[in-house]
Image (cartoon, rainbow, N blue to C red):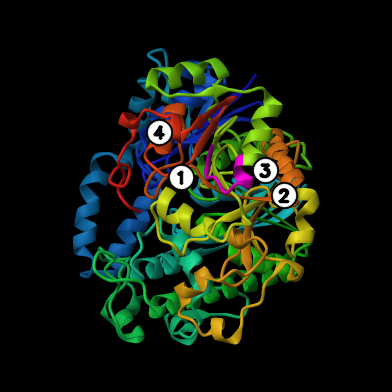
Amino acid sequence: MSSILGISAFYHDSAACILKDGKIIAAAQEERFTRKKHDPNYPHNAIEFVLKYANLKLSDVDQIVFFEKPFLKFERLLETYVAFAPRGFVSFAKAMPLWIKEKLFQKNLLFNKLKKHDQNFKSDEKIFFSDHHLSHAASAFFPSPFDEAVILTADGVGEWATTTVAVGKNENLEIKKEIHFPHSLGLLYSAFTYYTGFKVNSGEYKLMGLAPYGNPIYEDKVKRLVDLKEDGTFRLNQKYFNYATGLTMTNEKFNNIFGQGPRNPQKEKITQFHMDIAASIQKVTEDIMVNLAKSIRKEYGIRNLCLAGGVALNCVANGKILKEKIFDNIWIQPAAGDAGGSLGAALALWHIDQGNKRSVNLNDDMRGSYLGTEFKQDEIEIELKTLGANFEILKYDELIDKTAELLSNEKAIGWFQGRMEFGPRALGGRSILGDPRSDKMQKNLNLKVKYRESFRPFAPSVLREDLSEWFELNVDSPYMLLVANINSGKKIEMTDEQRKLFGIDKLNIKRSEIPAVTHVDYSARIQTVTKHTNSRYYDLISKFKEKTGCPVIVNTSFNVRGEPIVNTPTDAFNCFMGTELDYLVIGDCILDKTKQDPKLKKDYTKEFELD
């Protein structure tokens, strides 16, 4: 049996995955083990986990592949400096020592790190390097349910490419077109993330969540920064940006266009200005993605689209591409960011370099993205006892019934079941659950459980068979990567008076029968749930529907702001005891907050660096 270990590391979201005969066995991000969000370091723990799960020693693995090529990246750094010199000397001088010492000799660095897993690992001839955007494209196409597709990848930057178009057919995949650094849709969006006072490389989804509170009144000003062509291709006017040469994303010229400097999150509150800025950059991003999709559909005539790269996590833009009916089918890699590069690199090696045949799985090959750690019932019980937790063990039917009952009584529940998800979204493996019918649930979960900004929307998990009755959508969305509107029959229209309210004030108005998952523009980021991907989660939602008539529950990731999603029963218990969660359901165990030893309570608000 042939095995391949895929690794992504040293930028952000380090991860590892393992394939056996081309089948995805396990994959996980390093952050889940180290508890350091977006951990960019060598993924020692993630590699240990995937090897153990696959029952392999490192010396048994046939090939090891890294998700990008360090020499090409170094070439970009040097050429960027030469092109912009003497500007940029400071950022260049800061980057150089690390490159000269480590990154240029990455094969040697990787070999030395890998040896720590297994002293019998003797040869660096097993180590290969993929191309960054090829890794993204392969992660999107090879696990997809299509035998042929056009693949669009967009992110900040790989080696040189920032946006690529590829065509995949069976086991063949070829990149056809590229847009190169410094012209980058991901970096454009990150510039506005920085400008509105959020953290680059982690706050982009906050910008997307803020956009519906504003109006895109600065769209024309955003377009002054970008030369947009009709086919969706673009060039960024470098006069307004600082990321190629400096230590910030934007500069004074950028500030002058919009009339003020970047928001200082420590001192300045979010205002209507920031909401309108968010709405404007979101609108331009959507237009670019829709125009790119239209032009590649016309050029290649292929009816299936796959998406990957950080920009593919912009589920609002994905929803717009779907709504425009440009392609017959769309599939998006759930670990679309750099973590998924570990998987794409391994699949590219298996199919493209080694020419192994591909069999298409009509449900896709990601196994619901449940590719991480799992814990047996006895392991859970031992860990909980060691922590001093008070818990009850219930039979399966009782557990499902009681959890559904608690949800219907507006209790906030930590839900820890089965394998951990690969990618940034909690999909019913490591989730916090709530009642979507409650008009207090969104605010309470944000402020009392997640300790994060009150404007942040929550996602609905809905039974696939009930999807169209509740949402304007009728395609699978298992990975929470599509946004669509609430069905008009379930909406509660706002009055003229309510529409005039300041952005955030609209949050408190009941807008639908499921207000906890209805954003201010009546949209929702939807996860469809089926029996075959997650039977326990499906049974819970079905039981909730039986009790309430509502086939939808609130699903948000099991963590607080700034913390990675929980990985172990200990992480889950710590989060439970450090927040105002009411119950924790972990394996067949149920924990009631009121029955826990008060001495075990934690102050969780200062535990993690805010994102």
Say the numbered circle drawn on residue 559: none
Q: Could you give the CA–CA distance between mark 1 and mark 4, rounded to whole angstroms?
A: 15 Å
The amino acid on which the numbered mark 3 sits, given as a three-letter code, is Phe
Q: Which residue is mark 3?
A: 142
Q: Could you give the CA–CA distance between mark 1 and mark 2, rounded to whole angstroms?
A: 50 Å
Crowding at mark 3 (Cα within 10 Å: few <14, some 14-19, many 20+): many
Q: Nearer the viewer, mark 3 or mark 4?
A: 4
- If you read the primary sequence from the N terminus, does the residue marked by circle 4 or circle 2 appear first? 4
- In this rendered view, identify the residue nearer to me: 148 or 394: 394
Labels 4 and 2 touching (C-beta < 8 A): no
**In the rendering, at what x and y percent does residue 475 appear?**
76, 56
Q: Could you give the CA–CA distance between mark 3 and mark 2, rounded to whole angstroms?
A: 40 Å
**In the rendering, at what x and y percent does residue 605 appear?**
31, 47
Q: Could you give the CA–CA distance between mark 4 and mark 2, rounded to whole angstroms?
A: 44 Å
Q: Is residue 68 left or right of residue 539?
A: left
- If you read the primary sequence from the N terminus, does the residue marked by circle 1 or circle 4 appear first? 4
Considering every residue shown, the one lying at the far top of the view is 120
The stretch in magenta equals 406-414
Label 4 element class: loop
Q: Nearer the viewer, mark 3 or mark 2?
A: 2
The amino acid on which the numbered mark 1 sits, given as a three-letter code, is Glu
